[in-house]
Image (spheres, rainbow, N blue to C red):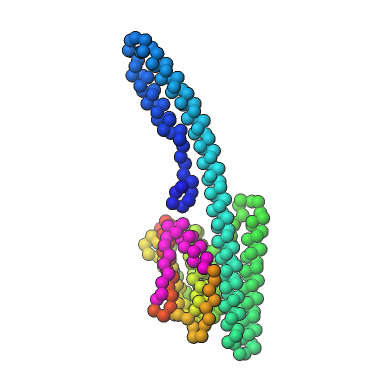
Amino acid sequence: MSGSGRPEWRSRAVPVLVAVAAVAVMAMMTTGAEGTAATVVPFVFVGAAVAAAVWAVRRWRADRRAYERRLTEWAVVEERLKIARDLHDIVSHGLGLITVRAASTRHLAKPAEVASALTDIEQVSRSATAELRRMLTVLRDKSDAAPKSPASDLATLPEIVRAAEQTGLRTELTVTDLGAVSPGVQQAICQTVREALNNTARHAGPTDVRVVVRRDEEAVVISVVDAGSAPGWRRSPGAGHGLVGLRERITALGGTLAARAKDDGFQLTARIPDEVAA
C-alpha cells in the first residue's frame, strides 16, 4: 500500500526470474568444459531454469490478476468515500444554513423580517433538495461520463458567500489575480470557503467574516477569519465531519489545512499547491 492507500504492484515472480537469469549464466559458463559433469550439469541447469520460468510466468499472471482486483476494490472504496463526502457537504451545508437562519428568527420582532427569514429558509431548502436529487440521479445513471457531483469553480465563490449572508454573516470576499487554476483546486477552494463559512455561522452566528483567496508562488492560499461570536449567540455545532473531510480533500491535493483561534475569533487557512502556472 502507498501513503494514499492505493495498492502497489508487487510480484513474487520477479526474484525467481532473476534467479533463472543467474542459472542461465552459470549454464553458459560450463560450456566448453569436459567430462560427465560438464555434459550433465548444463542440462540440469537448463531444465531447472525452464521449470522456474514457467512457474514465474504463471505466478506473475496470478499476482497481476490479484493486483487488478485489489486496485478495483480500492477504487470502489475511494468512490464511495467521495460520494459520502459530497452528500455530507450538501446535507450539512443546507441544514446548517437552515438551522442558523431558523435560530436567528427568535430575535426578530418585525413580521417583515420573519417573513424574509422564512423565505431564505425555503430557498436554501429547495436548493439543497435539488442538489440531492441531482446527486441521486447521477448515482442511478450507469454512464461513466456523468459527473459525480455538482461542479464548483471560482465563479461560484460569490454565490457561496451570498448564501452564507442569508444566515446573517457580514462577509468580505477578496480574490486576487490567481492566474490559471486547475479544476480540482478550484473545487477545493470553493469547498474550503463553504465549509469555513458554514462553521462560522454555526459557532459564531451573525458576525464579520473576511475571506481572502490569493496566490503564493506555486500555491493558492485561502484564509477565512471571523470576528468572534455575536453577543448572546448559542453555538450549534455539527458532527465534526466537515473539517475532517475537507482536510482529506486538501491533503489529497498535496496541501495543508490549519485552524486556530485569532484574536477574539477563528481563522481557517488552507494552502493548496497548483501545478498550473500563474
Asked if residue 186 is positioned above or below residue 119 in the image, the reply reads: above
Magenta region includes residue 255: yes
- For the point 63% across and 77% down, the residue is 121
Q: Which residue is at the front of the view, 272 or 180?
A: 272
Q: Is there any visible trace of residue 216 in the rendered image?
A: yes
Q: Is residue 15 left or right of residue 167?
A: left
Q: In the image as oriented, which residue stretches furthest toward the bottom?
A: 109
What quarter of the picture does the C terminus occupy? bottom left
**Image label count:** 0
Which stretch appears magenta? 240-262
On the image, the x and y values in percent for residue 271 come to: 41, 64
Q: Is residue 13 left or right of residue 125?
A: left
Q: Which residue is at the front of the view, 118 or 244?
A: 244
Q: Is there any visible trace of residue 174 in the rendered image?
A: no
- For the point 47% across and 63% down, the residue is 247
On the image, the x and y values in percent for residue 75 come to: 54, 49
- For the point 44% across and 22% down, the residue is 48
On the image, the x and y values in percent for residue 101 come to: 59, 79
Asked if residue 195 is positioned above or below residue 83 in the image, the reply reads: below
Q: In the image as oriented, which residue stretches furthest toward the top?
A: 35
Q: Is residue 70 left or right of residue 125?
A: left
Magenta region includes residue 11: no
- For the point 54% across and 53% down, the residue is 78
On the image, the x and y values in percent for residue 270 come to: 43, 66
Asked if residue 257 is positioned above or below residue 70 in the image, the reply reads: below
